[in-house]
Image (tube, coloured by chain):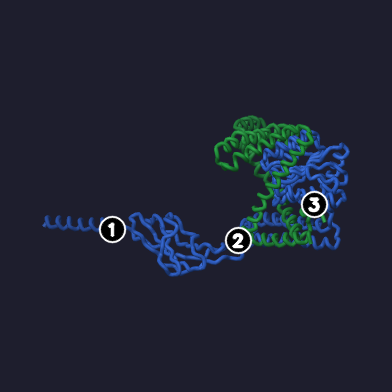
Amino acid sequence: MAYNKTILCIVACSIFFLCSTYTFSQEPETIPPSNVTVVDTPNDDGSSITVTWDAAPEDSGIVGYQIFRNTDGGEFEEVGGQLDANETKYKDTEITKGKEHAYIVRALTETEVSVDSLQTGAVKASGQWFHTGKIQLFIAMIIFCGAILGSIYLSRNNQEVFVRRIPGLEAVDEAIGRATEMGRSILYVLGLGGVSGPATIASMTILGQVARRTADYETPLRVPCNDPIVLNVVREMVKASYLDEGRPDAYSEEDIFFLTDSQFAYAAGVDGMMLREKPAAIFLQGTFYAESLILAETGNSIGAIQIAGTDSEHQLPFLITACDYTLIGEELYAASAYLSKEPMQLGSLRGQDWGKVLIFLTIVFGVFLELIGVNWITTFLQRVG
Amino acid sequence: MKRQIPLILCFLFGVIMLLTQFSPHSLSQGVYEEVLNWARIITPFALVFSTITLLQTHITRIRRQTEHWQYSFLVFAGIAIMVVVGIPFGPQNPVFEWLFNNVQLPMDATMFSLLAFFIASAAYRAFRARNTEASLLLITAVIVMLGNVPVGDLIWNKLISLTPWADALADGSSGAKQWILDNPNLSARRGIILGVSLGVISQSIRIILGIERSYLGGGD
């Protein structure tokens, strides 16, 4: 009896052990990628389709994914190679424009077993005319442009526009007068910017005004250029300024010349001119990089009156230190309006100020809202960025 | 008419290029790329013209025998050597590369290294404590300089331990430097950048609308 019980016990244990072993050694069932969606990628030129799927559970044994695409109902072909297991998105940029594409996402496991998702619906990619992600930027641009255009329109009706005194621009006449009295030349340096740079355009505008005065006073004006296109534009501008002042005979084309397009060779060339010719006035207006202090300190060493202006905020401390007057950032862009005194140009300065008021109010309001725990302004501005 | 056509073109291209920034459509981006290509095409022609003006300048110097006119021959020699070596054999040939690496680069580096001495002389003038603002600048500069050198924290901690604010300033000179850069410095820079951005918008509108037309030659 005891023998039978022992046998029965051994058999029961064996069955239990076998069942347990089977249960534990059984591989987890691989789940196919779920919730696979396919959309025409938003805010692009119609050259891509985005496939997304839900992340697989950590214990699913999935080691990667493969994407298969068909075109207009044809054969499926693999695209994009193997993706990592943590990927949940694939942007297919190799589609055929104007054709419909359907996708299958295949999950790959360690045991080389793979399971496919259901085939998605077919999608045709098309380009968007408006980038919805830039809507905030567009609104901001409309507001600022509106403020400036409104101010320009109002100034047409001869509304008087007050412009604060800008010492750097007030000193332009002083610098030209000094050079004239000393019988020396004026050196105008436009920096390293190209003709499409806003600072270079602003600098050329100031140069036009300076050239009018040098035409009147018959003071030599020397302009070494770093950019070939800038050279041609500057020659035309200065020539026109001399013509406008009725002094075409005083214009010397040789004084506006190309030096080099290499940064430090340009600095060396301009420094050499400063030391040889000892100009009485030096204008450093435009875009500058590391050469700004080399130029400004050399100008300082020869005792020239120096008027600088740049929008490169990293170079401003150098120019402020070494020059007599410096136009800081926006003052460079206000120079044209300030010197010409044209009502419409002055009106645009008022528009700029309205823009600044708007930014200031937004900052104050945003800080207040943050303090009370509301952060939609911060979120909005981050999206603009 | 000579003035009107450029103004119309400027208005049209200004508005079109502005709109392309908000439109990802292939047509819009194609127009954007095409206009940029046109701009790139102009550059080589302008470069040839500029080289001619450079040669003319130095020919005039030699002809008039102005001061140091002999150096103008070096300009011709430099241009001639680089053209003779560069154009037939391309910029990858060993002679061209040797000239670039052993002549141009060291000369550029020499000019750049002058900056260190100019910074010293400019800093000496700027940091003379003649008034309240200059004194503040001097103190700030000393803190930033201390924060930039390894021994700075050691000096800072010794000095601060003598003051009642030792606990409040325990982060060392590197901490103080970072605070200065992240707060007053960054605030001022952002203020300048905002002003510059509005200035650029304003100037662009003036140019697109033809209010500012001095770039065409003359102010009217």
Q: Please give the chain letter of the residue carrying mark 3.
A: A
Q: Which residue is mark 3?
A: A336
Residue beneath label 1, please? A23
Identity of the residue drawn at 51% across and 68% down:
A98
Q: Is residue A204 left or right of residue A11?
A: right
Q: Quadrant of the C terminus of chain B?
A: bottom right
Q: Which mark is residue A187?
A: none
Colour displayed for chain B in the image of the structure: green
How many residues crowd mark 3 within 10 Å: few (<14), some (14–19), many (20+)? many
Q: Residue at x 28, y 58 (%)?
A: A23
**Could you tell me the amino acid type at mark 2?**
Gly
The answer to whether dots 1 and 3 both sit on one chain is: yes
Q: Which residue is mark 2?
A: B30
In this view, the mark in front (1 or 3): 3
Residue A72 picture quarter = bottom left
- Tell me where residue A332 appears, x and y as whole percent: 76, 48
Given contact means CB atoms under 8 Å apart, are the residues at marks 1 and 3 in contact?
Answer: no
Are discs 2 and 1 both within one chain?
no
